[in-house]
Amino acid sequence: MTTSDCLPSSRAPSSQPTYHTSLLTAIDSRNHVHLILGTNSLAATRVAQSLAAGAKPILVAPPPPEDKPLHYSLQKHIDDGVLTWIPRRLVGEDILDRGRAEVGRVVDAVFVTSTEDMGWSEEVSRHCKRHRVPVNVVDAPALCTFTLLSTHVDGPLQVGVTTNGRGCKLASRIRREVAAALPSGLGDACARLGEVRRRIQEEDRLATKGNTDVVPAMEEVEEVTDEGVDDSLDQTSSFNKLVTEADLDAAKTRRMRWLSQVCEYWPLKRLAAITDADVDAVLQSYHDTVAGPLDAASTPPSPRLGRVILAGSGPGHPDLLTRATHKAILSADLILADKLVPSGVLDLIPRRTAVHIARKFPGNADRAQEELLSLAMAGVREGKTVLRLKQGDPFVYGRGGEEVEFFRREGMADDRVVVLPGVTSALSAPLFAGIPVTQRDVADQVLVCTGTGKKGLPPAPPEWVASRTVVFLMALHRIGGLVGELTGRVQGEKEDGEGGKRRLWPLDAPCAVVERASCPDQRVIRTTLRYVEEAIETEGSRPPGLLVVGRACEALYTPEKGRRWVVEDGFRGLDLDDFVAPGIAAME
Ligand code: SAH
């Protein structure tokens, strides 16, 4: 777990790394000129890397002794005409004269591949530094201005690892493990999604021909997406409105939102398997007016009605699944999962089982819900066991109750609809952040509420009770508004309501933002109501997340004086494998 602190002074950086880290960049090296000094196998590797990045390597090295021929791959590149060889020692002018005309002929990078003559390497490094030419000297970190990452390449996808000089073997091992954890086909998926992005932009450009508006960049669009709000709930009226062709501006933003939500929420395995048909189906769903792929009425009825299991899948970590839900996952014929269902849980679904993940994204929430319910009924009529898999607990802000009502209206008897509980994020996220929601002499009650009301209206703010812990779900995207409502009077609020004046919340009430609880990238921001908005703005968001407020936030944690907020990154709450039973330890 890593921690970073925000210092009170506005000039101070918001996070203080414990170790020196580098600025990782990806350099478009097409047509760059790289000087590679040496003829050993490392020189051959550098030449290959340079060529792979589209650069033009020049080998500068005296010919090797007669009995030691030039490395075969270097010789091949020279024979193929893609590598120039200057068969002598480097001179200063090579660095300043061999580059591209557009950068005044200075070369773009220099690689020293041998440690034999350190004095000379130092001289080359000094010369490069003086002329601001990036230089890399093997095994001499002090002489380098940049180092190379251990990389995994899959199509357009590159994953790089550095330990910042702590050992390239270690970096390469970590890179291998990271790469092994990625599903195959991810590179292709990156290419395909990049193509979708281009297509959306191109179509929007054509559709708005004559309109000078610029299509928003993906990054801009991402800023306005909801933050883990479960869009199975109603948002603002515009949020749920079906996009019509007349509403091109909204449509283009929403299609981009779909794309960013797919990237954010789909399990990587599913993303890696994305097909053109998937993409077409979703893009098309903006224009269709009929229900989803399965029309319930046209399904041939089975003599025996199937059943529906509505189950919660917990906050994120698959170990938090109940055994009942796990059994349901293994036995279902059809699984209809919500968008927020954690990928670790989806991974447990047997290969043979048909799965449909809700196509819920801003602008399509109601349609997606209808589609899921019609798929469920179609399955039930075919005699199937249909599992409606929801995130957290199905009855805690999960529309579970409404779904039960729907199935009853469709004529299903109560014994055909089973509801299984799940570990709710409302209680487990505080726990994983080290916040006991109740504790004697600190908090004797807990309130779970939403920060977003129906149709986007803010819900009535609860009053401050010193001994109460309050958990706000679906609140982080409008944190400023929420804090304002808690700490001040809201429009139309009577100074003296029926039950007396609502007690306002103090600005120094301790609170914590808990994001992606129980996931490997869990993050906790500990602060007070006064700084929570600024903290989220500074640190950015990592949906889904919730807000916990109350003295319980400081029951097991003592804030350091003068710190506006503290960020804790990472999750170790379920590393039970680290605890070796004494009996087993004795056997080892
Ligand atoms: N039925 C779910 C809640 C659905 S509402 C449950 O019982 O957990 C969706 C909201 O839940 C999100 O906006 C966020 O506030 C919260 N949430 C869900 N998973 C979370 C997680 N892993 N960490 C923090 N908050 C989470």
Image (spheres, helix red, strand yellow):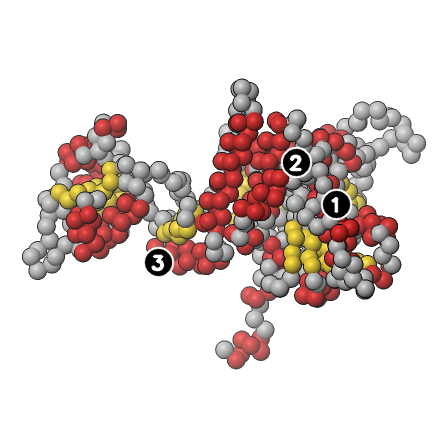
Question: Does the residue tagged 2 have its C-beta within 8 Å of any atom of ligand 1?
Answer: no
Label 1 sits on what residue type? Answer: Glu
Tag 3 and tag 2, C-beta contact below 8 Å: no
Provide the secondary structure element on which disc 1 rests: helix
Q: Residue furthest right?
A: 498
Q: Is residue 316 above or below residue 540?
A: below
Q: Distance between the residues labelled 3 and 2?
A: 53 Å
Residue 196 visible in the displayed image = yes
Q: Name the residue under label 3.
A: 169
Q: Is residue 272 above or below residue 321?
A: above
Q: What residue type is labelled 2?
A: His
Question: Badge 3, how many Cα within 10 Å: few under 14, some, many 20+?
Answer: few
Q: For the point 91% across and 34% down, which residue is it?
A: 499
Q: Position of residue 519 (x, y in %)?
A: 60, 53
Residue at the spot 22% in from the left edge and 33% down from the top edge: 99
The quarter holding residue 380 reads bottom right
Q: Where does label 1 land, which residue?
A: 370
Q: Residues within 10 Å of mark 1 (few under 14, many from 20)?
A: some
Residue 94 percent coordinates (x, y): 16, 36
**Which tag, 1 or 3, sits closer to the chain's start?**
3
Identify the element where label 3 is drawn: helix
Mark 1 and mark 2 in contact? Answer it, CB < 8 Å.
no
User: Is label 3 or label 2 in front?
Assistant: 2
Q: Residues within 10 Å of mark 2 (few under 14, many from 20)?
A: few
Does dot 2 land on a helix, a strand or a loop? Answer: loop
Q: Which amino acid does label 3 sit on?
A: Lys
Residue 279 screen position, x and y as percent: 57, 44
Residue bearing the label numbered 2: 287
Q: How far apart are marks 1 and 2 (CA)?
A: 16 Å
Describe residue 258's horizontal placement relative to residue 548 as left or right.
Answer: left
Q: Earlier in the sequence, mark 3 or mark 2?
A: 3
